[in-house]
């Protein structure tokens, strides 16, 4: 049996270059805090334990996650990466393999990590390295003539010769817990930064016949850390470019792959077309043939086959059937359910509205806390008055109802099948099937009216 995997995530650093009151590891990439990306990736490895080392902004970092299975370790003073790992070690069992990750390196892939973790045993540690055209600032990988890794030398401690090495330490490594418990107390801080370097365990391994096995990430972005907002934006763009590629491979047409942002999970069927400046948040599913017009926001929504969303629409917490037409300038709020072939047009807001097949709300309406049957026509400017200042009330509209324009439906109220409401009505009483309700002042025409004159 292989030994259990424990992940230690370092997240105690200050991140002063972010110039932010938000702890660095809570800055989001694709709408999710960097640290949460790393934790989710750690979870995908089926780790037996996940340990997060916190220091700066510890309370905020802790409060950002409600997961009883995480182990928190407080590093009160940031004395170096080796010292940071040592804070988590008391909670790590002796027979574990330990994978060290950084809270500010958010896009590391789980495949890369499981490969790395697979190399770790009592006789070998795994080190993730990468060759960079500009290795400035990183720890350099020092190898002997046989190509075996001997040590990592930090930039500030490196000789001029060592500074020319382009293979660098990503910071991510896997070591057996038994070795860490043995070696970390032996670290010294007599180096250029006066810190306890985790990287010094490499030289310890080399001198004790523990093999150093090197692995590489698929791309350099995976191991790119974030120190400032420029690097944060670079990672965001890289991540979004990857999402766009995935969507196109799955059969979506993106009018401009650089102008689609996915901040959550987006599933697409075939022949989905997405115009520019679409933002997707939470869980969104677009069935075959869905078309999204320019400048739309979709959050936690499911759209059926062939549904079209026209420009500048906001869809939030809604389920939409097949062949529906939404927008331009529509706003669907949580609890909206639109059946097949429905139409919700411009400047229409819906909330907790269940709309039956073929029904239309085409212009300038508010429909909230309402159920509509099939083939209902809601005229322009119709409002459900669902709120009396204290409570919300329901409006029920049956099949085939025609609501004339500029109507106020004062809830609670119900309108039975095939009833008609005259334009401009304020409806306060229920309407029976097939009735016509007109509730407005009668028109008077006064003959030979003379207008007032200026005195
Ligand atoms: C570290 C590595 C370096 C590597 C680089 C990759 C060491 C000594 N050096 O350098 O070889 O090339 O990462 O980015 O490990 N942290 C704590 N507590 C501490 C110190 C750091 O939690 O006391 C956390 C930081 O928040 C950060 C991570 O550890 O997430 C790395 O620390 P940082 O100071 O950025 O290390 P580097 O100097 O960049
Ligand atoms: Ca760093």
Image (cartoon, rainbow, N blue to C red):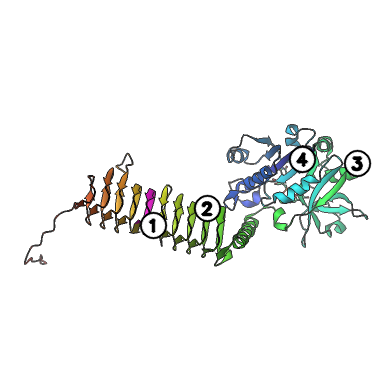
x, y percentage for residue 102? 70, 46
Helix, strand or loop status at disc 3: loop
Which numbered disc, 3 or 4, marks the residue that appears first in the sequence? Answer: 4
How far apart are the two marked residues, 4 and 1, measured between alpha carbons? 55 Å
Which numbered disc, 4 or 1, marks the residue that appears first in the sequence? Answer: 4
Task: Name the residue carrying label 4.
Answer: 98
Tag of residue 342? 1
Decide: marks 4, 1 in contact (CB < 8 A)? no
Q: Is residue 216 visible?
A: yes
How far apart are the two marked residues, 1 and 3, measured between alpha carbons? 72 Å
Which numbered disc, 2 or 1, marks the residue that appears first in the sequence? Answer: 2
How far apart are the two marked residues, 3 and 2, measured between alpha carbons? 52 Å
Report crowding for label 2: few under 14, some 14 to 19, many 20 or more residues within 10 A (C-alpha). Answer: many
Image quarter for residue 221?
A: bottom right
Tag of residue 208? 3
The part of the chain drawn in magenta is: 340-359
x, y percentage for residue 367? 34, 51
Residue at the far right in the pictured view: 145
Task: Name the residue carrying label 2.
Answer: 284
Q: Work out which quarter of the rendered image holds the C terminus and state it.
A: bottom left
Tag of residue 89? none
Helix, strand or loop status at disc 1: loop
**Circle 3 or circle 2, nearest the eye:** 2
Which numbered disc, 1 or 3, marks the residue that appears first in the sequence? Answer: 3
Task: Using the image as rendered, state which of residue 293 and residue 269 is in the foreground.
Answer: 269
């Amino acid at each position: 049996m292989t030994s259990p995997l424990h992940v230690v995530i370092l997240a105690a650093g200050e991140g002063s270059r972010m110039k932010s009151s938000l702890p660095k590891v809570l800055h989001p990439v694709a709408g999710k805090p960097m640290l949460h990306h790393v934790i989710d990736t750690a979870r995908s490895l089926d780790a037996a334990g996940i340990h997060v080392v916190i220091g700066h902004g510890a309370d905020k970092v802790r409060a950002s996650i409600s997961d009883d299975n995480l182990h928190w370790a407080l590093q009160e003073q940031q004395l170096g990466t080796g010292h940071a790992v040592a804070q988590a070690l008391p909670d790590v069992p002796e027979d574990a393999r330990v994978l060290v990750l950084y809270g500010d390196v958010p896009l590391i892939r789980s495949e890369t990590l499981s490969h790395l973790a697979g190399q770790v045993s009592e006789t070998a540690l795994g080190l993730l390295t990468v060759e960079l055209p500009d290795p400035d600032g990183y720890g350099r990988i020092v190898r002997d003539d046989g190509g075996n890794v001997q040590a990592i030398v930090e930039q500030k401690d490196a000789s001029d010769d060592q500074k020319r090495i382009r293979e660098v330490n990503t910071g991510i490594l896997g070591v057996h817990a038994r070795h860490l418990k043995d070696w970390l107390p032996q670290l010294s801080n007599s180096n250029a930064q006066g810190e306890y370097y985790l990287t010094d365990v490499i030289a310890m391994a080399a001198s004790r016949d523990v093999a150093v096995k090197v692995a590489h990430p698929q791309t350099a972005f995976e191991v790119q850390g974030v120190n400032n907002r420029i690097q944060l934006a670079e990672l965001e763009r890289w991540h979004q470019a990857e999402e766009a590629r995935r969507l196109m491979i799955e059969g979506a047409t993106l009018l401009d792959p650089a102008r689609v942002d996915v901040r959550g999970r987006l599933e697409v069927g075939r022949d989905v077309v997405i115009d520019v400046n679409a933002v997707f948040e939470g869980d969104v599913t677009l069935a075959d043939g869905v078309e999204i017009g320019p400048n739309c926001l979709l959050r936690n929504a499911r759209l059926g086959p062939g549904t079209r969303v026209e420009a500048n629409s906001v869809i939030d917490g809604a389920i939409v059937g097949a062949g529906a037409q939404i927008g331009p300038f529509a706003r669907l709020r949580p609890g909206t359910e639109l059946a097949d072939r429905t139409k919700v047009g411009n400047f229409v807001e819906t909330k907790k509205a269940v709309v039956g097949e073929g029904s239309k709300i085409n212009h300038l309406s508010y429909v909230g806390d309402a159920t509509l049957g099939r083939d209902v026509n809601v005229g322009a400017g119709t409002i459900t008055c669902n709120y009396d200042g204290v409570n919300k009330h329901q409006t029920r509209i049956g099949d085939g109802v025609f609501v004339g324009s500029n109507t106020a439906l004062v809830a609670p109220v119900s309108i039975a099948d095939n009833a008609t409401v005259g334009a401009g009505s304020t409806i306060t009483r229920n309407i029976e099937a097939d009735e016509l309700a007109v509730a407005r002042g009668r028109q008077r025409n006064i003959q030979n009216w003379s207008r007032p004159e200026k005195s």
